[in-house]
């Protein structure tokens, strides 16, 4: 058995959120992964399978997939090159360098950086590490649900799972995990921000669409096109995936409330999921009958993210007038 790069994260009962919603809420603390986000689950697994003998890995990332790839590569003794768009905050460069990565900046958004990563893989013979669109990633991410099942214990099933969506890799992993433990009927609330909403746009259009631009500050949700598997799951009659949007302001406010109440700092990508609780969206979905009355706890995937510190938080507050 190959070693895991991820850790088994705590599932914490959240009294303040539970009080707000009037139902038990549990937080799956993926922010406490060694790379600072859930990404290490899938990327660690993919690197184990594909990069053991590699002369180097290359990953295009808004930040967190890159940190996970650099972390896994360092543990395997393989060099890493991480390509990030110019929209990623400066602190991400430092985090990546701290993990021993060579950092390249290419283009404005993730899709531009990805084109450069694919080119480097081709010309330099590096192993390409996709941040969200690969079955090995989804298999790795699915362990988050296996852990939730083990923590909740026999006979307890979540009423719903709340998750943020960028390119949809985490969502695919959650669905796979729900299938693995026999919880396919558990609704999943899939959150994006306005301006980084490729999954929501695909659901509205009835097909995958490519956004013209990423206008949200939640840059780690900023893929222009969702992965095909996430879209296909959304069309399955066996699954209940509810796609919703919040504004950047709501996501940032959620980051602040979470910091205040739970003393944990996460980035806006994660704030998008938390905002579903703090903005009253979950309650509204229930009132409208779009989310059935929850028969078990709401499980919030606190996906984490390292593209944030106090300076970045105050710069975002200034930019978004929050
Ligand atoms: N971030 C990717 C893609 O960026 C990255 O390169 O790091 N929450 C956090 C903290 C994330 O970093 C990401 C993805 C997501 C949620 C969404 O995950 P996904 O892409 O699997 O839906 C452009």
Image (cartoon, rainbow, N blue to C red):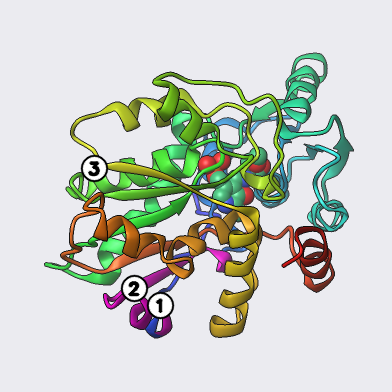
Examine the rendered structure and indicate whether residue 315 appears above or below residue 292: below
Q: Residues within 10 Å of mark 2 (few under 14, many from 20)?
A: many
Q: In this rendering, would 38 be left or right of 255?
A: left
Query: Residue 103's spot in the image, x, y percent?
Result: 86, 42
Query: Residue 316's spot in the image, x, y percent?
Result: 78, 61
Q: Quadrant of residue 32?
A: bottom right
Q: Residues within 10 Å of mark 1 (few under 14, many from 20)?
A: many
Q: Mark on residue 25?
A: 2
Q: Residues within 10 Å of mark 3 (few under 14, many from 20)?
A: some
User: Which residue is drawn at the image coordinates 41% and 29% (left, top)?
Assistant: 203
Disc number lying in front (1 or 2): 1
User: Pointers 2 and 3 in contact (CB under 8 A)?
Assistant: no
User: Pointers 1 and 3 in contact (CB under 8 A)?
Assistant: no
User: Pointers 1 and 2 in contact (CB under 8 A)?
Assistant: yes
Instruction: Please identify the residue farthest to the left as the structure is shown.
Output: 155
Query: Does the numbered disc 3 mark a residue whose Cβ is under 8 Å from ligand 1?
Result: no
Q: Please state the extent of the stretch shown in magenta in the rendering.
A: 16-32
Q: Secondary structure at mark 3?
A: helix
Gap in angstroms between the C-alphas marked 2 and 3: 22 Å
Gap in angstroms between the C-alphas marked 1 and 3: 27 Å
User: Which residue is drawn at the image coordinates 33% and 60% (left, top)?
Assistant: 284
Question: Residue 214 colored magenta?
Answer: no
Examine the rendered structure and indicate whether residue 221 appears above or below residue 202: below
| Among numbered discs 2 and 3, the one appearing first in the sequence | 2
Query: Residue 265's spot in the image, x, y percent?
Result: 65, 72
What residue did someone put label 1 on? 17
Q: In this rendering, would 318 be left or right of 188?
A: right
Q: Nearer the viewer, residue 10 or 285?
A: 285
Quadrant location, ligand no. 1: top right
């Amino acid at each position: 058995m190959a070693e895991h790069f991820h850790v088994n994260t705590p599932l914490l009962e959240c009294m303040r959120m539970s009080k707000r919603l009037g139902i038990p809420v549990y937080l799956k603390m993926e922010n406490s992964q060694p790379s600072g986000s859930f990404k290490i689950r899938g990327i660690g697994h993919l690197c184990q399978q594909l990069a053991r003998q590699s002369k180097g890995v290359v990953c295009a990332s808004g930040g967190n997939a890159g940190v996970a790839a650099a972390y896994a590569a360092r543990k395997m003794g393989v060099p890493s090159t991480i390509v990030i768009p110019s929209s990623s905050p400066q602190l991400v460069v430092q985090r990546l360098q701290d993990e021993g990565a060579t950092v390249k900046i290419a283009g404005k958004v993730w899709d531009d950086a990805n084109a450069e990563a694919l080119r480097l893989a081709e010309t330099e013979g590096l192993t390409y590490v996709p941040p969200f669109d690969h079955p090995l990633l989804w298999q790795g991410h699915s362990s988050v649900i296996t852990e939730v099942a083990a923590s909740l214990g026999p006979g307890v099933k979540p009423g719903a799972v709340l998750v943020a969506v960028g390119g949809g890799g985490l969502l695919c992993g959650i669905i796979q995990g729900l299938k693995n433990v026999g919880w396919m009927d558990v609704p999943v609330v899939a959150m994006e921000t306005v301006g980084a909403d490729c999954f929501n746009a695909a659901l509205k259009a009835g097909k995958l669409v490519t956004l013209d631009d990423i206008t949200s500050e939640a840059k780690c949700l900023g893929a222009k096109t969702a992965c095909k598997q996430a879209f296909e799951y959304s069309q399955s009659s066996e699954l209940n995936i509810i796609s919703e949007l919040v504004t950047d302001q709501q996501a940032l406010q959620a980051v602040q409330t979470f910091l205040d109440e739970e003393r944990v700092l996460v980035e806006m990508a994660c704030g998008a999921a938390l905002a579903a609780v703090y903005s009253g969206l979950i309650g509204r979905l229930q009132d409208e009958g779009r989310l059935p009355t929850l028969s078990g706890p709401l499980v919030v995937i606190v996906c984490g993210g390292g593209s944030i510190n106090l300076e970045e938080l105050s710069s975002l507050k200034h930019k978004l007038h929050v």
